[in-house]
Amino acid sequence: MATMEGSGSASYGKDVQTSTGGSQTDRAAVIIDGKAIADQIREEIGAEVAKMKEAVGNVPGLAVILVGARKDSATYVRMKKKACSEAGIQSFDVTLPEDATQDDVVAHVKHFNDNPAVHGILVQLPLPKHINEEAVLEAVSYEKDVDGFHPINVGTLAMQGRKPQFVSCTPKGCIELLKRSGVQMSGKRAVVLGRSNIVGTPAAMLLQRENATVTVVHSRTPNPAEITREADIVIAAIGKAELVRGDWFKPGAVVIDVGINAVEDSSRKTGYRLVGDVHFQEASQVASMITPVPGGVGPMTIAMLLSNTLEAAKRAYGVA
Ligand SMILES: Nc1nc(=O)c2c([nH]1)NC[C@@H]1CN(c3ccc(C(=O)N[C@@H](CCC(=O)O)C(=O)O)cc3)C=[N+]21
């Protein structure tokens, strides 16, 4: 039986692996169209931004700090800026060289902390190795932490009776997909695969807040498939291409696949294609609903970033 080997971190890197795709095409599952749902949310946000501009003469502002020249990071930052501009959100960007010091990065963060036109601050991850990510994320004012990565926001999410200022975008997007797809969470068994600070852990906390009974399965769990088979709802966030096979699911389970992994594909111009942590072709025979990769959780991450930024600006201007 397969085990989950891996760091349990979110799937931010490029995980190259040869595909083992089969040829069966019949599927039972409804595909949750994350792209369409995200587009809908982005439109709703755009309308609210326009209303805010009319009411208070200001729009939300998002600062994005990128350090270094990773191609994937540059692409994500470009997507975020485009999404902001389409929703009428002002973006402030800083790009620092790979050899920027931690003090440089923190100084930029603090500068944005003090800028009243900036309501949200995002430091694109991963940062270069010589920079302490924790120190930088802690420098972001927790009231502008639209990524939801500040320990105060991560911590209050885990506490009963407390509300974080912001919830991290990817897990928030997963829950929003479930809600907008009419999936009942209360009283259901949920399994989260992966325990990263950014996805797995907050996803588990959010499911618990929705009154699901949650189990977190991780790289040292001896029988992951067996435990996952008990779940009505599965959120997979392990960063391993197609590790989760069809026989890990209870028939009728709802599957949210957070993984974005590049696998070699010589039939593509790019030489690779993106797959999730879940073997989509197999899982879609067993699940009742499933998110695709791409076009599932990814677009929701950006929609939730805009939503958090709007929320931050509403608080700043006292708009309902
Ligand atoms: N401070 C910080 N905050 C983040 O939220 C953050 C980050 N750092 N570092 C990198 C990851 C990754 N991430 C994604 C955003 C959008 C898609 C997305 O829209 N994906 C599309 C397109 C995928 C493609 O074609 O490349 C899809 O899945 O359909 C994916 C991944 C945000 N991240």
Image (cartoon, grey):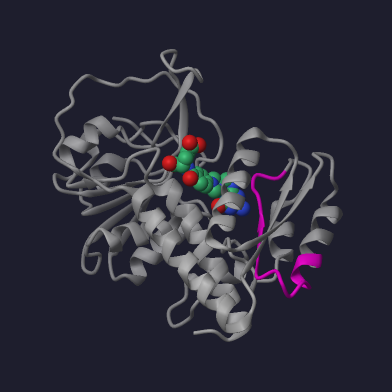
Could you tell me which residue is drawn at 50 percent across and 24 percent down? Answer: 16
Quarter residue 117 falls in? bottom right
Image quadrant for the N terminus?
A: top left
Q: Which residues are magenta?
A: 111-127
Could you tell me which residue is drawn at 18 percent across and 23 percent down? Answer: 24
Residue 205 in percent (x, y) is at 41, 65
In the image, residue 119 lies in the stretch drawn in magenta: yes
Residue 94 in percent (x, y) is at 76, 52
Residue occupying the far top of the picture = 266
Could you tell me which residue is drawn at 48 percent across and 17 percent down? Answer: 269
Could you tell me which residue is drawn at 14 percent across and 30 percent down? Answer: 26
In the image, residue 48 lies in the stretch drawn in magenta: no
User: Does 13 sit left or right of 215 as displayed?
Assistant: right
Residue 50 lies, with reference to residue 72, above or below; the image says below
User: Does 314 sit left or right of 185 as displayed?
Assistant: right
Residue 199 in view (yes/no): no
